[in-house]
Image (cartoon, rainbow, N blue to C red):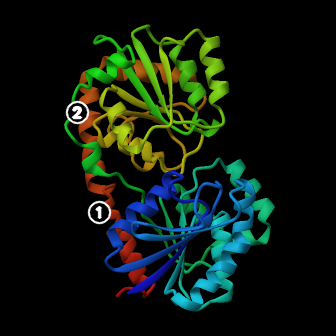
Amino acid sequence: MKKVLIFSTAYLPLIGGAELAVKEITDRLVGDFEFDLICARIKKELPRSENAGTVNIYRVGWGWGKIDKFLLSWRGAALASKLHAAEKYNMVWAIMASFGGLAALKFKLKYRAIPYLLTLQEGDTPKHIASRAQWLGPYYKKMFMQADYIQAISNFLANWAKNMGVKCPIEVVPNGVDIDKFQETRNNNQKLKEELNIKPEEKVIITVSRLVKKNGVEDLIQAMSFLPENTKLLIVGDGEKRAHLSFVIGNLSLGKRIFLLGSVSPGSVADYLSISDLFVRPSLSEGLGSAFLEAMAAGVPIIGTRVGGIPDFLADGETGLFCEVSNPKNIAEKIELLLNDDNLRQKLIFNGKKLVEEKYNWNIIAKQIKAIFRKLKIEN
């Protein structure tokens, strides 16, 4: 059995697109490979080590949030060397060019014969990425240059790697969707609508987003002031901007039409999508945008911006609609267009579901990742 050592800044139960991708892929490859994963502890209640299904998790640090992330590059690399002495890893896999990626780099520089795969999942703004690169200095570029293979979840991120000057192969393999979970029959969940006080004649807009600036949630809230009273907005997710967004909602007197629902379980996202008429995320930056794909799988038409990896799956007028960045009035215009044109809605729903089935199914994606492992010559 071949053994793969994964470095990730965080891992489950802390949930993000990157963490979910690792789980979905390793679940499907467990019969062929064994996986150990080193990450930052971040929270004190998380154990230093545990088995989570298909992955053995090793957490470094004291549960001190950002401090543990900074320590990961050193303590993680040291732990990796200790584990390698016993496990004899066949490959090292870094999830993002961040703190986990830096630990993977240190391991690679020590054990140069071991193949090193770098996965790019970044959804940060170019400004944020530039600040990280400046802080890490020459080590940032080395994370790319020392890689034997780079997998990017979007063409945007693949081009970013090319611009870094890498010489190794670069392949786009996106994140995916649990098709079965999101493509169950869309029942009219009357109980959930009653809990939210949504009347039958009202239209429901949904966004599933971390409440951070880059996801453009404030622009979507502002857009609601241009829309008729019979439209309501569900905001699923939490983050540092929650208090500010709550203030904006109150200041616009939209408290009865906008619901800040906070974090919900992944299974509950499908329930909220099932009562929604359209999904909107007017992102300022986006590595790919898995929440869009989940909405498409659930039969909810999407509106997004032409940034980052979104154009990989959003073809304007075919699989979704583009709105302008930081333009609430334009966002509202696109929402009204989609709510008032049922033929267009049905076209986007059909095309969106078909695209997700054909390209963004985790079963397909796991096979593509396995093929990359094969190219790195660690297959069984």
Where is residue 87 shown, x and y percent of the image? 52, 88
Q: Position of residue 293 (x, y in %)?
A: 38, 45
What is the quadrant of the N terminus in the image?
Answer: bottom left
Spatial separation of the CA atoms under disc 1 and disc 2: 23 Å
Q: Give SS at disc 1.
A: helix
Q: Report helix, strand or loop for mark 2.
A: loop
Is residue 154 at least partly visible in the picture?
no
Amino acid type of the residue tagged 2 in the rendering = Arg
How far from the left and from the top, in percent, is residue 189? 26, 25
Residue at far left of view: 185
Q: Is 280 or 317 nearer to us in this picture?
A: 280
Q: Position of residue 294 (x, y in %)?
A: 36, 43
Q: Residue at x 49, y 87 (%)?
A: 90
Q: Which numbered disc covers residue 186?
A: 2
* Residue type, label 1: Asn
Tell me if residue 205 comes above or below residue 40 in the rendering: above
In percent of the image, x 46 and y 32: which residue is there? 207
Q: How would you rate the neighbour count of disc 2 (Cα within 10 Å): few for under 14, some for 14-19, many for 20 or more?
A: some
- Quadrant where the image shows the C terminus: bottom left
Q: Residue at x 19, y 37 (%)?
A: 185
Q: Which residue is mark 1?
A: 363
Residue 76's place in the image compared with 172, above or below, is below
Disc 1 crowd, CA 10 A, few/some/many (<14, 14-19, 20+): some
